[in-house]
Image (cartoon, rainbow, N blue to C red):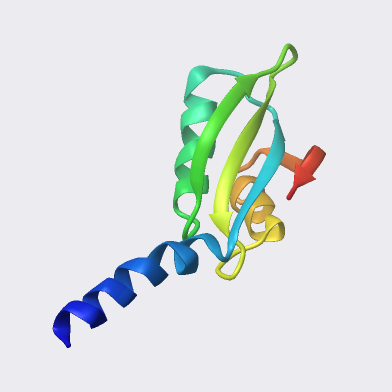
Amino acid sequence: MKRILITAILLLAPVVALAGEAQTRLHVTALTCPSCSYIVATALKRVESVKIAEFVEGEAEDGIYVLHYDDAVTDPKALIAAVTGVGYGAALADGGGS
């Protein structure tokens, strides 16, 4: 009986983990130095379930953060609020959410 229960849990666990997965591209402005990117990344990591998949530095003190998160726990508005809360501009980039 225990073996059946453990097998069932292992089979269902990946399904539960992927159920709310989402990706967003966030355009962040006013990144004037390397510390700015660190401050923004720290603020984003404090949002529950957020993982930074990639950061692409722009040409004019800006950049794009590609973020993965559980959409049952947070949403793009919370991500934008985290960035603006530490003093930087943020908006969904073209093709921002999925």
As drawn, is 49 to the left or to the right of 7? right
Of residues 40 and 65, which is closer to you in this image?
65
- The x, y position of residue 5, in whole percent, is 25, 82
Residue nearer the viewer, 18 or 92: 18
Image position of 57 with respect to 27: above or below? above
Q: Position of residue 80 (x, y in %)?
A: 68, 50
* Extreme residue in the top direction: 59
Q: Quadrant of residue 27?
A: top right
Taking the view exactly as shown, the residue that stands out farthest to the left is: 2
Q: Position of residue 36 (x, y in %)?
A: 54, 28
> Vertical placement of 63 versus 73: above or below?
above
Residue 32: percent from left, percent from top? 62, 19
- Going 53% across and 28% down the picture, which residue do you hit? 37
Looking at the rendered image, the quarter that the N terminus falls into is: bottom left
| Looking at the image, residue 56 lies above or below residue 45 | above
The number of numbered discs placed on residues in the rendered structure image is 0
* Residue at 71% in and 59% down: 77
Q: Is residue 9 left or right of residue 94?
A: left
Q: Residue at x 66, y 38 (%)?
A: 88
Query: As displayed, is residue 43 above or below residue 33?
Result: below
Q: Could you say which is closer to the camera, residue 37 or residue 24?
A: 24
**Side of 23 where 27 appears, left or right:** right
Q: Residue furthest right?
A: 94
